[in-house]
Each structure stands twice: as C-alpha cells, then as structure tokens.
C-alpha cells in the first residue's frame, strides 16, 4: 500500500509539471509497470460500476457496448502516446525512447482515477453524473497533453513550435482513433462524450 501511495505522489508531481520528477519517472525501472496500473485501474472500476447499474449486474460487462465503451478511450490514449513519441523522435529529434514518454504520460493519467466517482454517483442514483464524467475526462485529457508538451520541451529538448505540432497532432489522432475504434467495436451507439 505504501508503494502505491508513493507512486501516486510521484504522479501528482508529474501533474504539477515537476521537471525533475518527469525525468526521474521517465527512466525509473518500474515506472512502466506502475504506468500500466495507473492506466488500467479507472476503466476497470468504471466497467464494474457501470455494469452494476444494469439489471443483469456484472453480466453486462460482457456486452460489447459496456466493455468497449470503457476500453476504447484508454486504448486510444495509449496509442496516441506512442504515436506522439514516434513523431517527436523521428521528425523532431526528441528522442530518449518510447517507453520513457509512455511512463511520464501514463503517470499524468492518474487524474482519470477520479472518473469512478461519477459512475458511483450514477450508480447510487444521486444524480445523472455524465456531465461530471465529461468534465473529469476532458480536464484529464487536456492535462495529459499539457504534460506531454512540457516533457517534450524541457526533458526531450524539442523546440516549442515542434512540441506544439506534436501535441496538436496527438489531440487530433486521439479523437480520430477513438472515433474509429468506437465505430468499429461498438457501432453507431458510441459517443466521444457521454
């Protein structure tokens, strides 16, 4: 438990744009493992809480609509992380490895740990929390891109102009990937926002 709390503290430092912590997390040996945990926990909790709101309970997890609507945003974000790293490294000489870029942005994704609160509020029937979910998701996504920009400029030494191009390309690719995956895996019922 202490290790988890330490990882969350490091993630909060990354969110606060601490350059030393970004550099440390990017090269930390176990950061990839913790980054994956940080990315996987919110959609897993959201999937369980969302499924519990259906009459069939946890059986709803196995429907494509419930499962993929929780997974598509995370898959799109991870793919975007690697795409941004590839573009920065290949075209703008911002290289120190894709794993390092992933580590920092995965830690920045800790803000998505707030999303289960919206599903919990919805589950207990306090209110329709889709607006809260959209707010948390949007702020989290924007801040991941802010961290990406700062990491590119301060750690990878990419120019501000080039970092802006990489981040804008990342924003575009995230929404494009999410739209395509949503349409392919869920169909016409998939929405970018709830």
Image (cartoon, rainbow, N blue to C red):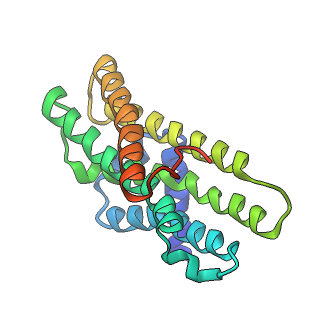
Check the image and report above or below for 93 versus 36.
above
Check the image and report above or below for 4 versus 112.
below
Number of marks drawn: 0
Q: Nearer the viewer, residue 103 or 24?
A: 103
Residue 169 x %, y %: 32, 29
Q: Residue at x 36, y 23 (%)?
A: 164
Left or right: 40 as drawn, with respect to 53: left
Q: Residue at x 40, y 33 (%)?
A: 171
Q: Nearer the viewer, residue 149 or 76?
A: 76
Q: Residue at x 53, y 55 (%)?
A: 110
Residue 148 x %, y %: 39, 37
Q: Nearer the viewer, residue 186 or 112?
A: 186
Left or right: 132 as drawn, with respect to 187: right
Left or right: 7 as drawn, with respect to 31: right
- Report the quarter where the N terminus lies: bottom right
Q: Which quadrant holds residue 48?
A: bottom right
């Amino acid at each position: 438990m202490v290790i988890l709390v330490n990882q969350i503290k490091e993630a909060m430092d990354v969110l606060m744009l601490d350059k030393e912590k970004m550099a440390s997390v990017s090269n930390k040996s176990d950061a990839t493992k913790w980054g994956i945990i940080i990315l996987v926990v919110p959609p897993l909790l959201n999937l369980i809480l969302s499924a519990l709101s259906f009459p069939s309970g946890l059986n709803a997890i196995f429907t494509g609509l419930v499962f993929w609507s929780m997974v598509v945003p995370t898959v799109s974000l991870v793919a975007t992380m690697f795409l941004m790293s590839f573009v920065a490294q290949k075209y703008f000489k911002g290289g120190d490895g894709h794993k390092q870029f992933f580590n920092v942005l995965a830690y920045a994704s800790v803000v998505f740990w707030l999303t289960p609160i919206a599903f919990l509020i919805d589950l207990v029937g306090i209110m329709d929390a889709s607006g809260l979910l959209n707010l948390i998701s949007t702020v989290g996504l924007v801040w991941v891109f802010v961290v990406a920009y700062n990491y590119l400029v301060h750690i990878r030494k990419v120019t501000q102009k080039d970092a802006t191009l990489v981040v804008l390309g990342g924003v575009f690719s995230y929404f494009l990937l999410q739209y395509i995956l949503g349409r392919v895996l869920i169909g016409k019922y998939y929405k970018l926002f709830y």
